[in-house]
Image: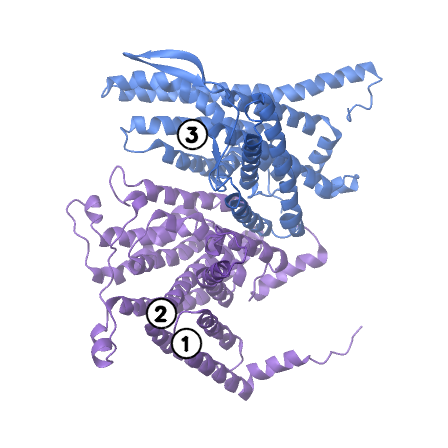
Chain colours: A purple, B blue
Amino acid sequence: MTTPRPAPDPWTQLRARLSSGPGGYVFLSLYAALCTGLLLLNTRTSLLTDILFILFMLLALVVYRSQVALGFKLGLGGVLFGLVLPYFGVLNPYYIDVATQAGIYAVLALGLNVVVGFAGLLDLGYVAFYAVGAYLWSIFSTPQIANLFAGAAPIASGWFYAFILLGLAIGAGFGVLLGLPVLRLRGDYLAIVTLGFGEVIRVLAVNLDKPINLTNGAQGIKDIGRPPLPLADFVRGTLGWTLDDNQLYQLFFYLLVLVILLLTVTAVSRLKHSRVGRAWEAIREDETAAIAQGIPLVRMKLMAFAVGASFAGMMGVVFAAKQLFINPPTFDLLRSISILSMVILGGLGSIPGVILGAVLVTLLDLQILPRIATVLRDAQKAGLPIPAAFDPTQYQRLLFGLLLIVMMIFRPEGILPEQRRREALHANEDTGTPEA
Amino acid sequence: MAGEPNASVRNVGQQRTVEIIRMVLLPLVQLALFIVGSAVVLGLIIVVVAFLLSRSDPMLFQTALAILPQVMIDGVVRGFLFATIALGYTMVYGVLEFINFAHGEIFMVGGFVGAGVGYLMQQIGLLTILPPLLFVLITVLAGMTVSGLLAMTTERIAYRPLRGAPRLVPLISAIGMSLVLQDLVRLIATSTPLGFNARFETPDFGQAIKLAEIPLGERSMPVMISPKAIIFITVAVLMLIALNYLVNATRLGKAIRATAQDMSTASLMGVNVNQIIALTFLIGGALGGAAGVLFGLNIGTVNPYMGFIPGIKAFTAAVLGGIGNITGAMVGGIVLGFLEAFVSSYLSMFTGGKFSGASYADIAAFSILILILIFRPSGLLGEAVTQKV
């Protein structure tokens, strides 16, 4: 029975008009200009600036979803995130730090997405690889190194770039190390074992101050080396910006993370559409059928672990250099779960979805929760009955937990789902057959 | 009693009684064997290692032997803790093939309920006049009720809507539930007088009982066991007996086993599958809650994050024993408890203090999990299960 297609409702019509054709260009340019203008007019950290900043970050999503020429999208994105945001960061360092964190998490989430989203292997100890990368750079760039190789001095900070690559390689190595013993395990066992692995790495980080002091135990490592600033003279001299070193480093790390994020997106999307990516997808959908098709299961699973872990190892190096201080609690299970919730919120397997998830969760965690906390404190001062002990920033577990449950029940495919996964998840609903 | 339709026929009735007794006792015998077995094996390993190391340090051998009985007692207590929590994992896994990640938090909630009841009793002055055993009974029952109901509620909210979804979906939901429970309890605890680290007020249980005194040079090593630990072990054994009776000798147990074997066929035979699953969560949760109360009682404080590590270890125990197998969970718990007690007591002694045993005990537990999953995924007592395609 065919029914005539209903006329699209006004909202859909409006969306279509604003996202494609000349209307699209005008709308996007106006939105971008408006956001930029308002943001640059409100540089003090406040609720209004928070909202503007979130709108600005979501602009990337609007640009991505619109149907305008690719060149225009890229150009607009480049101007917004390569020029406007760094400039805004000079005016208010707090927000650029949030953006940098979001970028770091986006790379981590993309890496985890390779393991969980592409290959369907639930990894609950992902942050272990991040820890390995971070400790790698921390040990080699501080006097800790003397405990490993007697008499060795911390290596020159210029080696930082080499260590990004080394972090990549060592991350991949650890990925294989974890992957080898757990290859035979089914999904849920795998989750618990990876969780155990994550805890083992954290416990080792706490305890490897004996017999030789490698990680400096629970105190953590401080005064981690930073790379030399490129273009510092150019910015101060030619541009005439009076910025101190910390501000310049903030800009530097923001841009570095942005570049790494772009490279990661390119690498991951190329992988996804390659032979390897299709093999992962086959393994995810049905392992037995994948073997029957001649897919080398062991090699493909190991590769997924290695690729996923390598991004975390690389980002660990950058994180340690940016943060200047690391300690074991930075790499606890909650961190792994928060990265997982980014992947799930955005959409398992979907690259834009995962980035969106990372940005949303980071904004929620670093900006919205503290803001709610401030609002609550003000309300409490004004005499409203709010318990003094309640601080929303301390309830991340509640937030991530609710996020996971709600997403699993109502939208397991995520906000920006991958096409094939959406089909798989909803095919079940029609027939109602449980999966074996 | 619900399960005796043929009580009038004496012969059949007698046979049935014998069968029930066997079903209830057999696991206990198995458990006892494993306790003795792991004690002997681990003890021998310690003796051999200590002997080998004693050439460099003559006192080491004597010290290692002198603390051995105490370590074994600690191992049994620890083992029963893991065992009681593992029962909840294994029951749910047996029925749904699903790892109830939030089970450690159910355990923690039990501990908090016990601490809350203890606090209330202290406030109204009951604590000093109440006999200790009655106190244990009240707190354990309270903990079992709340934890059981909570486990049932989590199933209803977070797992039932996802039945039939791909495997990882309910698991992720369970991880979420675990985090939510941790923070909800924290929110409640910090806004009441209990606080984050809640003291578990108890009546006076008396001094630890000295079982023996082992001479060691001029000093001597006492072998102690606290009355609380004895209560813990007794309650755990009673719970195992009750659970075995319930699962193997009642109609309800038959329905649970039928559901575990094949959900759709069981429902065709008239079993209300949803109800059975809810009951499984209730029973598993109640056992976890009881374990939480007893744990809090033993340790003296509870906190909202305390369920996580014992939860993971109990899962390890369940896998070690053969997940889905009730006796297996107990056995796995005992073996793991022994192992941890041995690692945490002897590792630093044998390495001259270079490695702290207590932290590496966690690593030992996780290594066991990985090794068991690789070499014998069916566990010590489990049967090999081929994956359905």
- Say which residue label 1 marks: A42
Which kind of residue does numbered mark 3 sit on?
Glu
Under mark 2, the amino acid is Val
The crowding category of the residue bearing disc 2, from other C-alpha atoms within 10 Å (few below 14, some 14 to 19, many at least 20), is: some
Q: Residue at x 32, y 22 (%)?
A: B49
Answer few, some or many: residues within 10 Å of disc 1's Cα (few below 14, many 20 plus, some between 14 and 19): some
Report the chain holding disc 2: A
Quarter of the image for residue B150 reads top right
x and y, in percent, of residue A425 in the image: 63, 59
Left or right relative to B20: residue A39: left
x, y percent for residue A104: 39, 62
Question: What residue is disc 3 on?
Answer: B340
In the rendering, which numbered label is found on residue A259? Answer: 2
The mark lying in front, picked from 1 and 2, is 1
Instruction: Assign a secondary structure to mark 1.
Output: loop
B28 over A143 or under it: above or below: above
* Label 3 – label 1 distance at C-alpha: 58 Å
Please, what secondary structure does the residue beneath circle 3 have? helix
Label 1 vs label 2: CA separation?
27 Å
